[in-house]
Image: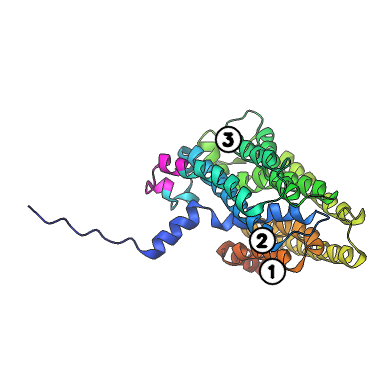
Amino acid sequence: MHPAKPTRPIPVASLVADGWHFLRISAIGATLSLPLLGAASSRIPISSRRALGLLGVAACFHSFAYVHNDVCDLELDRGQPLRAQYPLVRGALAPATALRFALVCVPAAFGLDALAVGGSRHGRRRMLGLAFALLAAYNRWGKCCPLPPLTDGLQGLGWAALIGYGALAAGAPTRLVHYLALYEFLLILQVNGVHGALRDLANDASGGARTTAIWLGARIDSAGGLRISRRLTGYAALLHLALMIVAARAVVVNAGEYRPPAQTSAAIGLAALSAGLAVIGKAARNGAAAPDLGMAHLILLLSAPVALAMPAMAPAPRLLLLAAHLLPLAINRMSFDALRGVMAGLRVRPE
């Protein structure tokens, strides 16, 4: 009887990389922030314990949303070079195992809601269930719908429902929750229909997927170059304008019922982000790389609702919101690539 060959241990770095891709840690800050943004719209200051509970629920929601999406889009993702190292794409993880993991995240989220969030459950569990259902619907039909903006909208409503869940968990929300939810809805239309759809355009087109960018006329030409239609450019510009109007109006009408110093802080935060967007525009005119500009644009758009919500929060939950928003960006190499790309574009003089 031959002795069994010793199994070779999996390097820790490989496990970390697989976990990073499998759970989409690079994007988790955008999810963790949402219920805290909703809670910030409340007239009742949220406690640190409840804020931590909301973060746990959001982590479960994030895991479900992205892992379920990867299972649904696996055949398409196999042709995407950017996802070649993902464990599902490599075959290092079975789709059935990933699906079971995603499904377990649903009761885990409701369990954490009961144990760690506490308080009145009036309406908030229905809102959380709605968020899960809408993301599941997008994941299943998002790349095959004849009218892609419709499924983009379903996804936008799902993420916005997570803001509503946070507001109901805290209780007594102000009008700010409506502005934050509308901003999130429009943001997802921009992120999914423009940024993400352009990034994946070549693979989506070759795989027969239906996305908003393709629907609006974006294409890859015979030389392999990206061609963006006027319709898509106009769509992106309208969404960007709408986002800026929603954020600015939330401050002007004092939707969060801020005291004057807090309202001023929110206005200063939005003004700083607007200045950053102007810098990106200048770098774009100087010919900075499109991926770097896109990432920098996304970071600033994601930061606007944080700037709106922070002035209304107690110090400890405010720090949690900042950490949830900034830490994933700080450990994401693309954030620094975007910063370097924009700075390089500012140093180049246009011909």
Please name the residue shown 80% across and 53% down the image. Answer: 41
Above or below — where is 119 with respect to 230? below
Please name the residue shown 54% across and 42% down the image. Answer: 69
Observer-nearest residue: 39 or 228? 39
Q: Earlier in the sequence, mark 3 or mark 1?
A: 3
- Crowd rating for badge 2 (residues with CA inside 10 Å; few <14, some 14–19, many 20+): some
Location of residue 243 in the rendering, given as x and y in whole percent from the top left corner: 79, 50
Observer-nearest residue: 71 or 286? 71
Image disc number at residue 143: 3
Image disc number at residue 49: 2
Q: What range of the chain is rendered magenta?
A: 88-100
Q: How is the image coloured?
A: rainbow
Q: Amino acid at mark 1?
A: Val
Q: Does 218 sit left or right of 12 as displayed?
A: right
CA gap between label 2 and label 1 equals 49 Å
Location of residue 79 in the rendering, given as x and y in whole percent from the top left corner: 46, 43
Residue at which label 1 appears: 348
